[in-house]
Image (spheres, grey):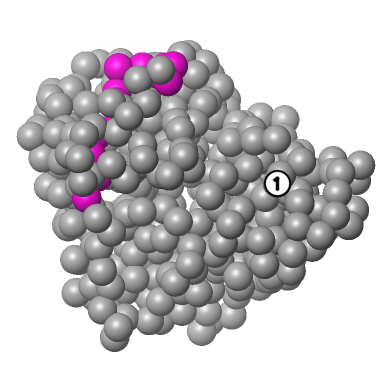
């Protein structure tokens, strides 16, 4: 739940003075008068009806599978920023009753996450918690590698979603994105101008696409989060350079992580490397704390001169996940309420790791394995 300048507005549910704004409404730029609340309790009570404002009327654009139409056909007047168009998505995949699930599995609302003090205070993870997060991260890594190996021209991102979903189930894990604030799929697949949160659909991958695969596993009460951007077929030099620069910016930031480092310094490191190659860093999305919650403190912005608070301490667990664009850093969101794209339609790349701060540095819990499919410069 994001705070906002709301003191002059009444709660959308009970009309008391508002103190908080729905984070999805804030991201989508929706009017404040229908998206502010006086408390977490009012927000939770309003959620079953309020969540409908995040989607197009009757969800026709997002879920028009029965008529077999592309989603873009249902929104012909939307001002697309680039050549990519959304396609038909398949029904939500099922998770067996035997798999432990996060609280948002039923109605899409992460109650525990929104109520937790971890939104303000970064927890110090002990050995048991760290071991649990490490296990979830290992599953996430294995599953991402399977999806990356399958990503070839002609394969749909919906097929990658199937691979991720089934691989999670086989390992006794729940795919964390599934139904998180009503996200309809088990993985985010972001192509070309999509910055993040792309929804898998029936579009076939094309030779020359760049593709980000963002995987999170929920296993025995803990989440593990990572993503990579890969080449699909033969990618041009600009696209390959964008991917390499984004990867290297992340690794330079990770190399600086240790007790006593300010979280705000991460953005300076990433921006310096990106700018040296003529690229820009997205400002709307940031790294985050993770553990028994999918998202919590700290916030870790990736752009320079940010105002992030706090310093790294031994036992802190968080992600760093820079999104770097060929052109402008500015972003827009498709009418599905999730798909973030570059404002100018140029390409974007992202890499993400989950790490824990140790006594003398940090451990990358989602590190690549000897069996991980090689990135383009490793092939």
Judging depth in this view, the residue of 126 and 201 nearest the camera is 201
Q: Quadrant of the C terminus?
A: top left
Picture quadrant of residue 251: top left
**Identity of the residue drawn at 54% across and 44% down:** 54
User: What range is drawn magenta here?
Assistant: 78-90
**Of the pair 271 and 150, the residue shown nearer to us:** 150
| Observer able to see residue 137 | no
Residue 132 is covered by the magenta coloring: no
Could you tell me which secondary element the residue under label 1 belongs to?
loop
Relative to 260, 14 lies left or right: right
Q: Which residue is mark 1?
A: 35
The picture places residue 257, in percent across and down from the top left corner, at 58, 51
Horizontal arrangement in the rendering, residue 276 relative to residue 64 (left or right): right
Q: Residue at x 68, y 71 (%)?
A: 116
In the displayed structure image, the side of residue 62 where residue 364 appears, left or right = right
Can you say which quadrant of the picture contains the N terminus? Answer: bottom right
In magenta segment, residue 85:
yes
On screen, residue 41 versus residue 248, left or right, reads right
Callout count: 1
Q: At 56% across and 22% down in the image, what residue appears?
A: 330
- Give above or below for 29 relative to 326: below
Structural crowding at the residue carrying mark 1, measured as other residues with C-alpha within 10 Å and reported as few (<14), some (14–19) or many (≥20): many
**Residue at position x 43%, y 44% from top?**
58
């Amino acid at each position: 739940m994001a705070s906002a300048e709301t003191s002059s507005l009444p709660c959308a549910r009970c009309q008391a003075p508002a103190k908080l704004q729905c984070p999805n409404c804030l991201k989508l730029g929706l009017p404040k008068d229908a998206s502010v609340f006086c408390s977490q309790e009012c927000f939770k009570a309003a959620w079953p009806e309020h969540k409908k404002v995040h989607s197009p009327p009757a969800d026709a654009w997002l879920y028009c599978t029965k008529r077999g139409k592309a989603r873009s056909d249902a929104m012909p007047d939307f001002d697309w920023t680039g050549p990519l168009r959304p396609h038909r998505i398949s029904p939500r995949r099922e998770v067996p009753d035997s798999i432990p699930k996060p609280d948002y599995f039923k109605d899409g609302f992460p109650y525990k996450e929104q109520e937790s003090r971890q939104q303000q205070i970064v927890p110090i993870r002990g050995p048991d918690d760290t071991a649990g997060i490490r296990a979830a991260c290992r599953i996430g890594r294995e599953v991402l590698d399977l999806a990356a190996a399958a990503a070839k021209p002609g394969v749909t991102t919906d097929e990658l979603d199937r691979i991720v979903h089934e691989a999670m189930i086989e390992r006794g894990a729940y795919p964390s994105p599934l139904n998180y604030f009503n996200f309809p799929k088990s993985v985010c697949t972001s192509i070309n101008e999509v910055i993040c949160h792309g929804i898998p659909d029936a579009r076939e991958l094309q030779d020359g696409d760049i593709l980000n695969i963002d995987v999170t596993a929920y296993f025995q009460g803990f989440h593990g989060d990572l993503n990579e951007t890969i080449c699909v077929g033969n990618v041009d030099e600009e696209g390959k350079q964008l991917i390499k620069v984004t990867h290297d910016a992340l690794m330079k930031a990770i190399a600086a992580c240790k007790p006593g480092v300010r979280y705000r310094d991460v953005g300076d490191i990433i921006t310096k490397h990106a700018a040296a190659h003529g690229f820009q860093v997205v400002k709307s999305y940031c790294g985050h704390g993770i553990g028994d919650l999918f998202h919590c403190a700290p916030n870790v912005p990736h752009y320079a001169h940010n105002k992030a608070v706090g310093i790294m301490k031994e036992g802190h667990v968080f992600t760093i996940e820079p999104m770097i664009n060929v052109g402008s850093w500015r972003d827009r969101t498709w009418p599905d309420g999730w798909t973030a794209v570059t404002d100018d339609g140029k390409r974007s790349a992202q890499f993400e790791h989950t790490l824990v701060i140790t006594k003398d540095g940090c451990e990358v819990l989602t590190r690549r394995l000897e069996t991980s499919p090689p990135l383009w410069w490793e092939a």
